[in-house]
Amino acid sequence: MIRLALAFTLFLLAAPAFAISDPNEALPDPKQEARAVAIGEQLRCLVCQNESIEDSGADLARDLRHIVRQQVAAGKTDQQVIDWLVARYGNFVRLRPPFEASTLLLWGSPVLALAGGAAIVLLARRRQGESPPPLSDAERKRLRRLLDT
């Protein structure tokens, strides 16, 4: 059982290495490949959404990795490559979009969710502390009749 758990852990740790499905996909120059990987780690897989294009095995991520490597090989700067992809896919392609007016809701969503959750908890506690009004005589008589039957 321990061997199986260890093998599974090693597989999970090695999963990003399987993202490049074709060894020919890597650039021959190690410095350019390192730059391409660094750029790819900043870009979101539009299919998986919570993985970078370097970690994803989706076909679209493979295509985006290819585009990044083409542009790096063509001599584009890191910012030029990212700007090119943002121009085509919007800021959503970035794993960490910039803080702008258009991304305000994206950045503010966690704060809004926490505030909403806190408001719900406070309202629930406030209602929990209120005791119901006492029963009227008619309600007591009806309750006794219901309990007696």
Image (cartoon, helix red, strand yellow):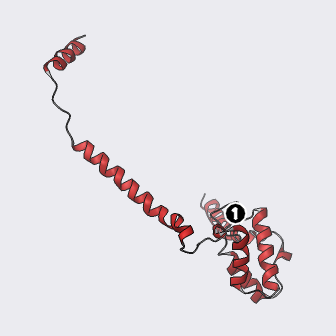
Locate residue 92 relative to residue 85 in the image: left or right: left
Q: Going 73% across and 70% down the picture, which residue do you hit? A: 88
Locate residue 23 relative to residue 144 in the image: left or right: right
Tally of marks: 1
Q: Nearer the viewer, residue 18 or 56?
A: 56
Query: In the picture, residue 148 is in which quadrant?
Result: top left
Would you name the residue on which mark 1 appears? 46
| Place of residue 138 in the rendered image (x, y in percent of width and height, measured from the top left) | 16, 17
**Crowd tier of the residue under label 1, counting other residues whose Cα lies within 10 Å: few below 14, some 14–19, many 20 or above:** some
Q: Nearer the viewer, residue 23 or 123?
A: 123
Q: Going 80% across and 75% down the picture, which residue do you hit? A: 67
| Place of residue 128 in the rendered image (x, y in percent of width and height, measured from the top left) | 26, 42
Q: Residue furthest top?
A: 149
Locate residue 144 relative to residue 111 in the image: left or right: left
Task: State which quarter of the image contains the N terminus.
Answer: bottom right
- In the rendered image, the vertical position of residue 44 relative to residue 122, given as above or below: below
Identify which amino acid the numbered label 1 is placed on: Leu
- In the rendered image, the vertical position of residue 76 relative to residue 103, given as above or below: below
Q: Secondary structure at mark 1?
A: loop
| Place of residue 114 in the rendered image (x, y in percent of width and height, measured from the top left) | 41, 59
Q: Going 82% across and 82% down the picture, which residue do you hit? A: 27
Query: In the picture, residue 57 is in which quadrant?
Result: bottom right
Query: In the picture, residue 136 is in which quadrant?
Result: top left
- In the rendered image, the vertical position of residue 43 relative to residue 126, given as above or below: below
Task: State which quarter of the image contains the C terminus.
Answer: top left
